[in-house]
Amino acid sequence: MTEIHGTCDERFGGVRDAFAANFAQGLDVGASVAVTYRGEPVVDLWGGYTDDARTRPWERDSIVNVYSTTKTMTFLCALILADRGELDFHAPVAKYWPEFAQNGKAAVEVRHLMSHSAGLSGWTEPMKPEDLYDWDKSTRLLAAQAPWWEPGTASGYHAITQGYLVGEVVRRITGKSLGTFFKDEVATPLGADFHIGLDPREFGRVADLIPPEAVAGAFAAPPDSIPMRTLGNPPLDALQSRTKGWRMAEIPAANGHGNARSIARIHTALANGGEAFGKRLLSAKGCEVVFEEQTNGMDLVLGAPLRFGMGFGLPTPGLPLGPNARTCFWGGWGGSLAQIDYDDHLVVAFAMTKMNSTTLGDARGVALREAAYRAIGEVPA
């Protein structure tokens, strides 16, 4: 039986049980879960190993690449700038990034970048995995290309490109890279151990992701389809996450490194009107912008009905998330999760090594989320 470490408020014992059950069922090798409620940490647990051979225990300060859960950090950076009046989500992207107006994109708005509806879910030019480490090339190609569908009419998951698109807007406004702005304005003030662009001095505590046994279903799509062009260019292998190049680069849609504690600590601000642990990141009104629906329908890349607010995914009948309408989330390839309930002031975060093929979280995170809702007397949706 896997030994579970950390702290757990007695009221939230069901979360601990669900976390332990994931290991007992062979679903996890190494993982962490954290919950904050009404601004306070109530669950901070970890267990297992940071390698597939099970030779290195997952420690309190172990961190791991959480893939698209990184996007939630990028959204938060944009929300902060919007709250300060430095960024208008309804303004054309070209207001901040003039080169972006090329090839019929003059009217594309920042909110389209945030909601995966800009029509730039992938690169038209062939890309090698290593090209993702080249910020200038990645953004220059996106600025030059034409949209693959009419912007604003539908979402199509911008799996990797979203980080460069939103990140370049942040860079044009602040003069800082997304990773630097995030560190200065979010991670450091909150004392959160999350990194977009990892210092090599931190490599020794990074857990190795264990690639999924099955590939994501979208790769069965025709070669010239939007899903395949999005997810196959460049081709990504989870083992790439173990390389120095991947870890050090700033890929703000995919290569954030942290653990459940840091994910929960950061999003406690969003769940509590913009303030957490004595630090205010943005106003309550700035938080509520998240719930302004931007798209609602079949996603052109993931092939599932999705509803996006300003960045985050929002509840749908098929993806209820919980009992409250003002709940948002996003997850990462493999199973990591960040869920924020603005009404119950609840955050549930999960980070792990053993990957599934899912891009939207999986049963492990659902079990943890449902246990957290039961702990506060809510009926999980």
Image (cartoon, rainbow, N blue to C red):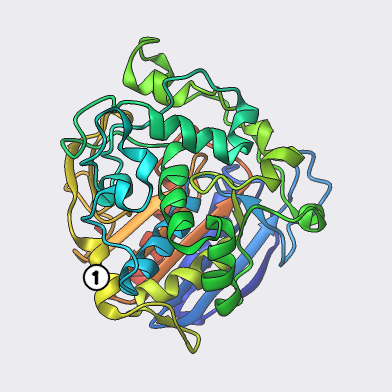
Q: Image check: 329 left or right of 41?
A: left
Which residue occupies 50% across, 23% down? 215
Residue in the foreground of this view, choosing between 344 and 369: 344
Residue 321's place in the image compared with 43, above or below, is: above
Q: Image check: 238 left or right of 267?
A: right
Q: Quadrant of the N terminus?
A: bottom right
Q: Quadrant of the C terminus?
A: bottom left
- Based on the displayed image, in which of its 4 quarters is residue 127 positioned? top right
Furthest residue in direction bottom, as rendered: 278
- Based on the displayed image, in which of its 4 quarters is residue 155 positioned? top left
Disc 1 is placed on an element classified as: helix
Which residue occupies 38% across, 61% down? 78
Q: Image check: 380 left or right of 153?
A: right
Callout 1: few (<14), some (14-19), or many (20+) C-alpha neighbours within 10 Å?
A: some
Residue 361 rendering spot, x and y as whole percentages? 43, 45
Residue in the foreground of this view, choosing between 351 and 234: 234
Furthest residue in direction front, as rendered: 98
Residue in the foreground of this view, choosing between 133 and 169: 169
Residue 161's place in the image compared with 96, above or below, is: above
Task: State the count of labels.
Answer: 1
Residue 239 rendering spot, x and y as whole percentages? 68, 32
Residue 95 rendering spot, x and y as whole percentages? 30, 52
Residue 353's place in the image compared with 274, above or below, is: above
Which residue occupies 40% across, 14% down? 220
Residue 235 rendering spot, x and y as whole percentages? 55, 22
Which residue occupies 38% across, 67% down? 81
Question: Is residue 64 among the parts visible in the rendering?
Answer: yes
Q: Amino acid at mark 1?
A: Glu
Residue under numbered circle 1: 288
Question: Is residue 343 among the parts visible in the rendering?
Answer: no
